[in-house]
Image (cartoon, rainbow, N blue to C red):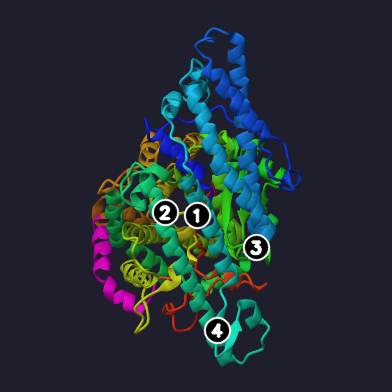
Amino acid sequence: MFKQAICLLLALALLSGPAPAAWNGPVHQEVDYADMLPVTPFDETALLAALKELEGICSRHSRDRDNQEARRRVQALYGQVLEEMDLLATKANLSSIQYDASGGAPEEASLYLELSAQQTRLYDRCYQALSAMASSPYSGILDEDAGEGTARSLLGYRGLTEEEAALYEEEDRMIQDYDQIMEQGAPVLVEGTLWTAEALEGAGLDAGAYEAVSGALAAERYRAAGELYVQLVRLRTALAQWADYDNYAEYAYEALYTRDYSLEDAAELHELAKRYILPLQLRLLEETSGQELRALSVQSRMNGEEVLDAIQPFALAFDQKMADTFRFMRAHHLYDIEYGASKLTTGYTVALPAYGSAFIFNSPYGDYQDLSDTVHEFGHFFETFHCTQHDLWTDFNIDVGEIHSQALELMFTGQAGELFGARYGEVYRNAVLYNILDSVLDGCLYDEFQAAAYQNPEMAPEDLDRLFKELSEDYGYSYGPGVDSDPTWVENAHNFQNPLYFISYATSALSALDLWFLYLDRPREAKEVYLELSALSLSLPYRAAAEKVGLRDIFEPETIPALAETLDGYLDGEPVSYGQRRAGAGGERRLPYILASAAALALILWLRTRPSRKERTETRRRETLDPWSPRQNREPLRPSGPDPWSVQDKKPPWEL
C-alpha cells in the first residue's frame, strides 16, 4: 500500500533522470516497539507552517541571495520538513501493522486510510515547496543532502490534480475492500438461506450440506474479488493515462518500479523459466517425499522467540554488522511474528524512519516455513536498518531488495543440519530451494497474467479465470477433467495490493541463486558481495546493481541455462565451482538432461501436478495448522494424501 507517494516521487524523477540516493538518513534510536504505541493521528500544522515559510523565503531569493541568516533558516526548515514527513510515514506504517494485527478492525482501518490520504496530499505539497527551493539559490542544500541532481529533478514539478488524488484514495479503499472479502468472505444465498463464513462454522450441518454451503461461499468470494479486480484494473488504467502511458503495465514497470528491463525482456524470461527452471523444480518434487516434509514440519514447530533463537547463531557468525543488527532488533522487539487468531494473513518489513529503524510483521504457519520466512524478512530488515533514508527520498527498487532476502534464505540452509540433523537438514534445504524456484516460476506466471490484464483492461472476471488456467498449465500446473477456468488467482494478494510486483521475485530469486553458488564455493567472497549489495540501499535499478557487485545478468541468454546446469549438478552431489562451466562427461550430460525433461513435460504433467499455494485464511481459523491443503480444482500430488509442498503467499518486503 501507500503507492501513491512513490508514484509521485518516481514520476518526478523521470523528468530528468532518476535522483541519486540519500545518504544523510535518520539515526537509529533505542526505542522499544511498545513505546511507539498507540498510533495517533498526524498533526500537520507544523509541517504546513514550515512549507509556507520555506516558500516565502525562496520566493525572495533575489533580495536575500547573500543573506546567511536566510540560508540557515532555509536549512532548518528543510530539516523540519524531512522530520515531519518521517513522522507521518512512521505513523502510517505503524498503523498498517496495527491494521494487519487486528484483522482489519474498523477503527484501525479508519486511521490507516486517514494517514494514507494525508501522505498523498502532503507529499504533493512538499514537492511543490521543494520545487520552489530547487529554483532558488538554496538548491545546493537539496543536492548536498539527497544527492547530486535532486534539485534539477524537482524543477517544474507538476502537482496532483484533485482527480488524481481522488483516484489514489479510491485505490486504497478498494484494496481494503479486498482484504475484507478474503478475510471475512461474502454472503451467499443457498436454498433460501443467507450464509456467511461465520454462520457456517456454528451451524452444525451434515457433511453434504456443509460442503455445499462452503463451496458456494468460496465461489462467491472468488466472484466478488474478481469483480473488484476488474474495477481496480480500470482505475489504475486511468492513473496510467494521467501519466501519459498507454497502459498500466508499462507505467508500473517504468514509473512505479523504475526497472531497467522492459516488458519484452520479461517475456523472454518467462520462456526461459518454463524451459530450464520447471524441470528442476519437478526433480525436487520427485526426490522429496510428503512423509519427510511432514516429519520436518513436526520438528520445526516453534513460537516466534524460538524461531529467532534458531536464527541468531547464523546472524552472529555471518558478520559483526549483521550480529549487531539482529541483537538490536530483538532488544527492542521490532517484530510481531507470533500466531494470532485475528491477524491478516500477510508478512512484510516496513521502515520506521522517525526512529531510524524497521519492523517485521508475519502471520506464521507453525512449521518450517516460519523459519525461512523470518530469515527472508530479516534480510529486508538488515538492508533497511543500514540504509536509513528520509522518507521523502526513499529509493524503491524491489528487484534488488528481494535479492537480500532470498539469498539469505539460501545461505541459512547450511545451518539446517545443526537444527534438524543431516537427513532433515537436507529436506529443509530442498524445501527452500523448491520455494526459490517457485518464486521464479510463479513470478513469471503472475507477471504474464497481470501484464495481459492491464494491457487488455476490458477483460471480464470470467476471461481472467480462463486466462489464468491456460497460463498455469504452461508453468506446470494441472487440472482435473472438465476444468476450463481457475479463479484462485484472487488468493494472491499481490494481484490487488502490488500490481506487476511479482516478477521481482523471479529476477531476484535467480540472482539469489547466483550469489548462493558463490557462497557454496567461496563463502567469504559471497558475504562481501552480500554486504556490498545491502550497502547500495535500493538506489540502483536491478541490472545496474547486479553488475556493480559482480553478479551475472539474468537477461543474458546464457545465464539461466548456466544456473540450471549448476543446480542440477549440485543436486547430484557435485561441488559448485562458481563462474566456471563444468567440463567433462558429467557437465556435458546435464544440459541435454534438462532439455529432455522439458520435452517430456507434457507427459509428466498428466502424472503429477506442481503444488499450489495454500489458502491461508481458512488455515488461520484452526489452532493446529495444516500446511498441506491442496488448492481447489487442482489434482492432488499423490493419490495417498494432500499436497506437501504448498507454500505461503509471497509477501511484500515493505508496504509503502
Q: Which mark is residue 430?
A: none
In this view, the residue farthest toward the front is 162
Give whichever of discs 3 and 2 has the lower sequence position.
3
* Residue where numbered disc 1 is placed: 171
In space, the residues marked 3 and 2 are separated at their CA atoms by 26 Å
Amino acid at circle 4: Leu
In space, the residues marked 1 and 2 are separated at their CA atoms by 8 Å
Amino acid at circle 3: Gly
In space, the residues marked 4 and 2 are separated at their CA atoms by 32 Å
Q: Is residue 323 magenta?
A: no
The residue range painted magenta reads: 588-609
* Residue where numbered disc 4 is placed: 189
Position in image of residue 293 (x %, y %):
53, 70
Give whichever of discs 1 and 2 has the lower sequence position.
1
Amino acid at circle 1: Glu
Q: Within 10 angstroms of label 2, few (less than 14), some, or many (20 or more) residues?
A: many
Residue 78 location, quadrant: top right
